[in-house]
């Protein structure tokens, strides 16, 4: 019998995108699938929209608001799949995504591989998404994958992965303490118990850009900064457990340096702790640099003002671009996404 794939969707205040995401899951050409959605105490009509898809074999559950990681853990506890496809409530899958990855398992005949695939960012029109390859878009060993991620500050979208139940059970639950980068830390743990990464070029996923509404957006949230710092220290521990070499230690220092702008100057305690870790790794942590476009503001108005401008002005440009993309999407496809009527 062909394996069952569980598509697991955590949802919170997702009324704007949920129907499109669910239709993306239902459109998978891999027929043996179950779709489980957990509404994490939404304050809008997310649950009402989700319920309309129950007639299409979508199982809908709800819980009090506990965060995306807790919703994912509940979804997994309810599923029966041999493979797990994680899908955020605003992201999309190519119709052949899951089929391509399942077929790749047969080609390599190793169910302990972690399956990945290409992914691209979009606002409202997935047809305009550009797939730009990175150093992670290859078949890689556990150590090489994590090394490249930390050396080059790369990442993969959650929807790009397909994970066997065996690996999912071995790695344990998502870490509910992590309000940001919970997916980055989780898939590092999956990587640790796998035999490496199998990259499937036909298995495309689409990651929607939502700006400051994204879980990964830190902004001025101290709780998210602390969660990010926790995830970073876990990353360093994972890589050093795989390989404690000069290259791995240098990768850890570079990883710290790349992320320090998220903490400096607001959290000098975290910066100081990071500097001590870098020193212990044989490196040196420098004061982070602002982009040349904003560095002149630092001399006139100080660090906080210049850093705020570097964060907010691009967000303003992205907001305008996202609005224009929405207008063009309505011109290209004036019909709204259809929501089932329950019959």
Image (cartoon, grey):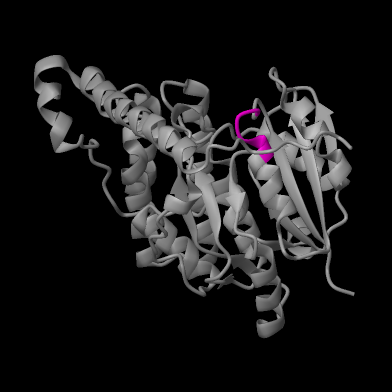
Q: On the rendered structure, is 32 left or right of 186?
A: right
Say whether residue 140 is magenta: no
Q: Position of residue 241 (x, y in %)?
A: 55, 61
Q: Is residue 256 above or below residue 85?
A: above
Say whether residue 16 is magenta: yes
Q: Is residue 52 above or below residue 147?
A: above
Q: On the rendered structure, is 266 left or right of 43?
A: left
Residue stretch rendered in magenta on the structure? 15-19
- Which is more toward the observer, 164 or 272? 164
Image point (48%, 40%), residue name = 124
Image point (36%, 45%), residue name = 256
Is residue 185 shown to the viewer in this render? no
The image quarter in which residue 259 lies: top left
- Which is more toward the observer, 130 or 153? 130
Image point (58%, 57%), residue name = 160
On the rendered image, what quadrant is the C terminus found in? top right
The image quarter in which residue 72 lies: top right
- Which is more toward the observer, 59 or 272? 59
Q: Position of residue 31 (x, y in %)?
A: 80, 64
Q: On the rendered structure, is 9 left or right of 1?
A: left
Image point (69%, 76%), residue name = 103
Is residue 101 shown to the viewer in this render? yes
- Please identify the dominant SS of the magenta region: loop
Q: Position of residue 327 (x, y in %)?
A: 42, 32
On the rendered image, what quadrant is the N terminus found in? bottom right
Q: Position of residue 166 (x, y in %)?
A: 79, 64
């Amino acid at each position: 019998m062909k394996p069952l794939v569980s598509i697991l969707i955590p949802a919170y205040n997702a009324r704007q995108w949920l129907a499109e995401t669910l239709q993306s899951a239902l459109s998978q050409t891999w027929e043996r699938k179950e779709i489980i959605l957990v509404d994490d105490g939404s304050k809008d009509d997310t649950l009402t929209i989700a319920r309309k898809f129950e007639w299409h074999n979508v199982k809908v559950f709800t819980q009090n608001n506990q965060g995306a990681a807790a919703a994912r853990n509940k979804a997994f506890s309810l599923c029966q799949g041999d493979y797990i496809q994680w899908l955020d409530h605003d992201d999309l899958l190519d119709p052949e995504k899951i089929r391509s990855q399942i077929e790749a398992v047969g080609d390599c005949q190793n169910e302990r591989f972690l399956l990945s695939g290409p992914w691209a960012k979009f606002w409202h029109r997935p047809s305009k998404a550009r797939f730009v390859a990175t150093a992670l878009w290859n078949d890689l060993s556990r150590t090489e994958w994590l090394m490249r991620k930390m050396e080059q500050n790369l990442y993969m979208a959650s929807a790009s992965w397909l994970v066997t139940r065996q690996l999912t059970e071995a790695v344990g639950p998502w870490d509910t303490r992590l309000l940001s980068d919970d997916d980055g830390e989780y898939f590092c743990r999956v990587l640790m118990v796998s035999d490496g990464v199998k990259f499937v070029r036909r298995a495309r996923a689409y990651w929607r850009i939502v700006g400051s509404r994204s879980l990964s957006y830190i902004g001025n949230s101290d709780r998210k900064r602390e969660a990010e710092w926790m995830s970073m220290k876990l990353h360093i521990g994972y890589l050093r457990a795989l390989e404690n070499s000069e290259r791995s230690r240098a990768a850890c220092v570079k990883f710290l340096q790349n992320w320090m702008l998220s903490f400096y100057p607001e959290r000098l305690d975290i910066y100081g702790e990071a500097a001590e870790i870098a020193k212990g790794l044989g490196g040196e942590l420098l004061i982070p640099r602002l982009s040349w476009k904003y560095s002149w503001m630092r001399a006139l108005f100080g660090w906080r003002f210049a850093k705020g401008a570097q964060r907010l002005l691009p967000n303003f440009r992205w907001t305008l671009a996202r609005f224009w993309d929405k207008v063009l999407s309505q011109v290209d496809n004036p019909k709204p996404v259809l929501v089932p009527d329950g019959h």
